[in-house]
Image (tube, rainbow, N blue to C red):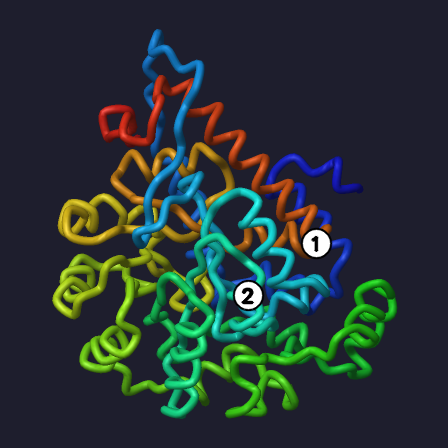
Amino acid sequence: MRLSDCHNVADFRKLAKKRLPAPVFHYIDGAADDEITLARSTAAFNDCDLVPRVLAGVETVDMSTTLFGKRIEMPLFLSPTALQRLFHHDGERAVGRAAEKFGTFCGISSLATVSLEEIGRTISTPKLFQFYYHKDRGLNRDMIQAAKDAGFDALALTVDTIVGGNRERDFRTGFTTPPKLTPSSLLGFATHPSWTLNFLLRERFELPNLKNHVRQGSNTAVTVSGYFTSLLDQSMDWKAAEAIRAEWGGPFCLKGVMSVECARRAIDIGASAIMISNHGGRQLDGSRAPFDQLAEIVDAVGDRLEVIMDGGVRRGSHVLKALSLGAKAVSGGRLYLYALAAAGQPGVERILGKLRGEIERDMKLMGARTLADLSRENLRFR
């Protein structure tokens, strides 16, 4: 299977599975407990049908929007995800350059494998920094200041990782960051020599935004779930979130909001946006799909802050359904991580091109010349 054989997210998933050692692939692919929420996050779109208009004069369409005060060329952007140089040696560099080519936001995680300074210096299009609230207050201050110095356009505080989720696939495969070469993992690494040589011989793997404060993840192997549980501050509350918003001083988002109550409180602390997200199904299994929660949250707060729907997106039609319900923009992680693992920057560019093409084609088929033409009038729920 080659890059040219990949026409959708599912195809890239198959190629990523061939390219990655099993523990690394299953880290991307897996979720918490029985992975019910992971499956539901995509399946939820199937309960909603599109009702197109015709004879709308759609020779050209405009799919641009404004998010965090920045114009982007498409209503889909790349969610912040951790550890990207484990999946391809270019990691966040490849993802950032692909996002730049398509004129959309890229999200950079606190657990990124490329520094905020480098991303800020090399990527000209809008950038979102995803912030984890650590017990180490000095680390928190340094990361926020680094994001300011690097010219990031918005900060998203992740609020759904108060403890690590029960990621059983990681336990079964022995996945850690950085990966450990053990007798049980040796076969998987040996049968993927390209990945293994890149990991061993290229730039040393580390978490540059954290390494001066914590050893875990750079010099000491740790599970991601263990990292969250041991190093993130479980006392984080609304007062702490408001203080982070004030320290940041720019467009501020809460990532992981799933209820109307929390969306309203986000407004009270001065948030300018929320990301409706269940962390890719990797935290609380049995929780709702973001798409299932979208309408009630938009109805409650959509006129007072920007509502982003994050997760489960595999098709351009999924994007249009979310926008029709009132989302300002849509984001996803696995949709580009599979592509990154499969083929690096060319892979990310190919899946973004495919999804952008689907959004444009489906807008024309829907009779929508701009995103403003999308509404609940063109939806029916089963």
- Image quarter in which the N terminus is found: top right
Residue 195 x, y percent position in the rendering: 80, 65
Q: Label 2, label 1: how many angstroms apart (C-alpha)?
A: 20 Å
One can see residue 188 in this view: no
Give SS at disc 2: helix
Q: Which residue is mark 2?
A: 121
Q: Are marks 2 and 1 in contact (CB under 8 Å)?
A: no
Q: Residue furthest top?
A: 55
Residue 111 x, y percent position in the rendering: 52, 75
Mark 1 residue crowding within 10 angstroms, few (<14) / some (14–19) / many (20+): many
Residue 260 x, y percent position in the rendering: 17, 57
Q: Is residue 91 above or below residue 344?
A: below
Q: Is residue 305 left or right of residue 9?
A: left
**Occupied quadrant, residue 169:** bottom right
Give the amino acid at mark 2.
Answer: Arg
Q: Which residue is mark 1?
A: 344
First in sequence: mark 2 or mark 1?
2
